[in-house]
Image (spheres, grey):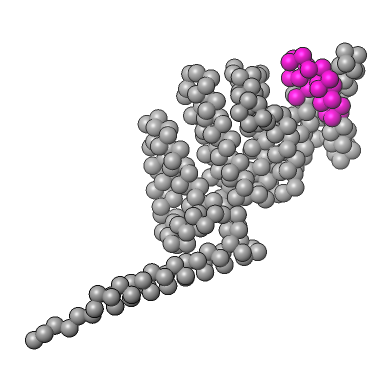
Amino acid sequence: MKKYSLPRSAIISSLIIFVLSGLFFLQFRISNMRVASDSGYMYLDPLEVIPITLLGSFRGVLVDFLWIRGIARHEEKKYYELLAINNLIAKLQPHFPAVWIFQAWNMSYNIAYEWESPENKWRWIKAGLSFAEKGASKNPTSGDLLFEISYLYFHKFDSRSFRYADYYRERLKEETGKDNYEQALYWAKKSLNYNSKFRKRIVIERIVCHILWRACLQAEEDGKMKEAWEYAIKSVKEWEAYLEKHPDDPEGIARSFLEKINEKRLQLEQKV
């Protein structure tokens, strides 16, 4: 008995129709996800939306597996493999700010600490900052993530805390044209526009004041007296605004700081 079979052209045509239908459905889903007003997918690239759409409920299982792999790679000190895993986790959980915060701090602090040379330390600090800022582009209303970026720029470049902080500041300026204190101010003030789960608003307001004070002292140390004087003026204004909002000053430090900074401002004014 002769077997009946479809012509090859019919099979190919059916496959093409099937594939095109699938692509049309996927594009339809991506478009809906990206334009929805209550969805964060509008901040994602198409290549990031595709795996989220296709994986569906299996995404959580894969993320758990990647976290376990990441911990193992960290313990094995296979940091470049860990970086690749971090990027995958971030693609699968782009709207989970804790992912971006944890991995950025892990790179900027834990991994950077493992290296001896300031060059290698800086490479991981820069990677952590870049990672966090990419996360902010996906989560522009996360007060916590925005604040953590500010604190990285403030704390990691503080010469009182880190031996190579001066080197980090120079490299940041050379490679990006950025000033760490200006970046710290930018992200801290931006974080005040949104709710934060881990930091009280009053704490962030005090941090803004401290950033300006440290910027003043650093500029003075670098011999930039006019810049130091300008930072002192800004710091005084911030502390005054802080006291106007919080006259009780729960920490009890604002007035003493204000006296100290005003004294420094007068000293710098004479030098300028």
Is 224 within the magenta? yes
Residue occupying image coordinates x 50% and y 24%: 120
Residue 56 appears in the rendering = yes
Kindly give the residue lying farthest to the bottom in the view shown. Answer: 1
Tell which of 111 and 183 is nearer to you: 183
Of helix, strand and loop, which mostly describes the magenta segment?
helix
Residue occupying image coordinates x 70% and y 28%: 179
The mark tally for this picture is 0
Residue occupying image coordinates x 82% and y 17%: 225
Residue 197 appears in the rendering = no
Where residue 233 sits: x, y (%)?
87, 27
Is 222 within the magenta? yes
Location of the N terminus (image quadrant): bottom left
Tell which of 243 and 88 is nearer to you: 88
Say left or right for 154 vs 75: right
Where residue 76 sits: x, y (%)?
37, 31
Above or below residue 258? Residue 195 is below
What's the magenta region? 215-236
Above or below residue 102? Residue 109 is above
Location of the C terminus (image quadrant): top right
* Residue 231 figure quarter: top right
Where residue 189 sits: x, y (%)?
75, 40
Above or below residue 241? Residue 226 is above
* Residue 108 figure quarter: top right
Say left or right for 116 vs 186: left
Kindly give the residue lying farthest to the left in the view shown. Answer: 1
Where residue 38 sits: x, y (%)?
64, 63
Tell which of 178 and 253 is nearer to you: 178
